[in-house]
Image: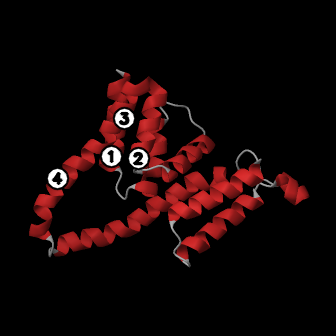
Amino acid sequence: MIFLKLFLSFFKVGLLGFGGGLAIVRLIYDSIQPFLDMSREMFANIVAISQITPGPLAVNTATYVGFEAAGIGGSLAATFGVILPAFIIVSIVVRTMQKFKDSKFVKGAMTGIRPAVMGLIASAAATLVPPSLAGEGRLGSSLIGALADTPIDVIAVIIMLVTVVLMAKFKKSPFIVLIVMGCIGAVLGA
């Protein structure tokens, strides 16, 4: 029964998870709660790990949650559940997209979907930012003395801002930025 529940829960994520990646973080978080009572901080860690491992966020998260909830069978059920809707939808869209590519209705729908995806990404930020910047432990707490008692991790904020600048202004590779920032976190968190 757990396998079917995992499959259906992640099928819903795959079916309703428009925008993919960070746009569906909140949907994933809400969907895993029946299986694992997971804090936002633990979920933020899973998202971070999913971002630096090969494969889409939803698939990596489904695989992890399925495994934690019901072992290898749960991992397979959740992973298959999250990928099946995309396979079905893409198969249908590919067949019909050429026919409707000039439709004003389709162009209008795409124009309306873009700001909605930005809203979904903002929702992901609202879910992930608090535990990332004010979660357990402080990076470099011995370096910043009195600031270590503040609710905000100053070093984590600096890492986030530097990452934004590296990505937006200098167009650095996300993989390299994640590795470098992970190494900085490892050194400062030790």
Label of residue 58 in the image: 2
Query: Is 134 placed above or below 8 here?
Result: below
Rate crowding at label 4 as few (under 14), some (14 to 19) or many (20 or more) other CA atoms within 10 Å.
few
Q: Amino acid at mark 4?
A: Ser
Q: CA distance from mark 1 to mark 3?
A: 10 Å
Check disc 2 and report its element: helix, strand or loop: helix
The mark lying in front, picked from 1 and 3, is 3
Q: Amino acid at mark 1?
A: Gly
Circles 2 and 1: CB atoms closer than 8 Å: yes
Residue 97 placement: quadrant:
bottom left
Q: Where's the N terminus, which quadrant?
A: top left
Q: CA distance from mark 2 to mark 4?
A: 19 Å
Q: CA distance from mark 3 to mark 4?
A: 21 Å
Residue pointed to by mark 1: 14
Residue pointed to by mark 3: 78
Check disc 3 and report its element: helix, strand or loop: helix
